[in-house]
Amino acid sequence: MSEMEGSHIEHWPEGFGLEKCQRRLRKMTSHVVTFESPVPKVYQTLPPPISDMEEVLAIMFTGPIKPSENDMKRVPLLVRRNKVVAALQWLQLNHASYSDLEISYKNLDEYPEDQPPVSIEFRREETNKVPEAMSVFDNESEEGIEDGPCPFVVHGLVGEDLDTKSVNVLKGTAICHWNKGGAALRIGWSEKLQSIYNNPELYPQMFPWLFPYGMGGVGSTHLSDKSHKRFLLMYHDKRFQKDTHFPFVAFSHSQVKESNRGCT
């Protein structure tokens, strides 16, 4: 897996809707380089033992009483074994990096289907709402539902929230988070840059959602880099065009290569 390092900003003219302009107007402010993201373990066998999952993932319930068994069944973090096996079998047959994967049915049998497979923590609180975040029209005592599946909420800054906030706002939010005793996850990277030359695995590793088979990266065919990138951007489902980062990364790497050729 590779980690991208670079930046871009949003810009939209007055009178235009923010959502519309975010999709159309983006500007790159620096070139993009890539690092390998080391992981603690590389698994030859999947799924991993349930004990390994408990080391990196946990579920926290907040509220006046502990969750019951019926509450557990409504949590959207249950493991459906048939779905996991189907996904792993598909990767084994279709993805080059998973061709030698061993599927452990023994490990999979350890995962319960009626409750989450990781440790569950409970914090007693009278309400699950943040007073500072409540509007004047919010009259409900707590967030939740009486029937149906339990909603899954991710707390923090994710996705496009990062693109629409200034650096000062992000720093202020981070400081408030730390002052309240919040935790953070840090993912390191290798000191050595990944090469953009003769490295057909680079783009599939950077954009696994665009290359689900792990093949077809730039440099893997007889096409030139320019022609290959043009072909990808004209792909029938438009996924390369619609991706937020791929066009910028492809253009940045092309600029770097052109500048190197111009200096020799």
Image (cartoon, grey):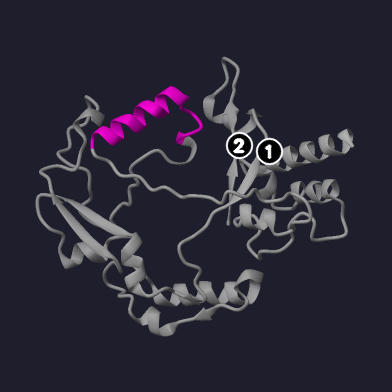
**C-alpha separation, residue under disc 1 versus residue under disc 2:** 10 Å
Is most of the magenta stretch helix, strand or loop?
A: helix
Q: Residue at x 66, y 64 (%)?
A: 214
**Residue 95: x %, y % from top left:** 64, 70
Q: Quadrant of the N terminus?
A: bottom right
Left or right, residue 59 beside residue 260: left
- Please say if 70 is above or below 207: below
Q: Secondary structure at mark 1?
A: helix
Looking at the rendered structure, the kind of residue marked 2 is: Gly
Q: Is residue 172 magenta?
A: yes
- Please say if 228 is above or below 26: below
Looking at the rendered structure, the kind of residue marked 1 is: Phe
**Residue 41: x %, y % from top left:** 47, 66
Give the residues in magenta: 161-180
Q: Residue at x 57, y 20 (%)?
A: 16
Residue beneath disc 1: 248
Q: Secondary structure at mark 2?
A: loop
Q: Which mark is residue 6?
A: 2
Quadrant of residue 208 within the rendered picture: bottom right
Q: Earlier in the sequence, mark 1 or mark 2?
A: 2
Q: Quadrant of the C terminus?
A: top right
**View extreme (top): residue:** 14
- Please say if 71 is above or below 92: above
Cβ atoms at labels 1 and 2 below 8 Å apart = yes
- 18 or 180, which lies in front? 180
**Residue 20: x %, y % from top left:** 58, 29
- 115 or 92, which lies in front? 92
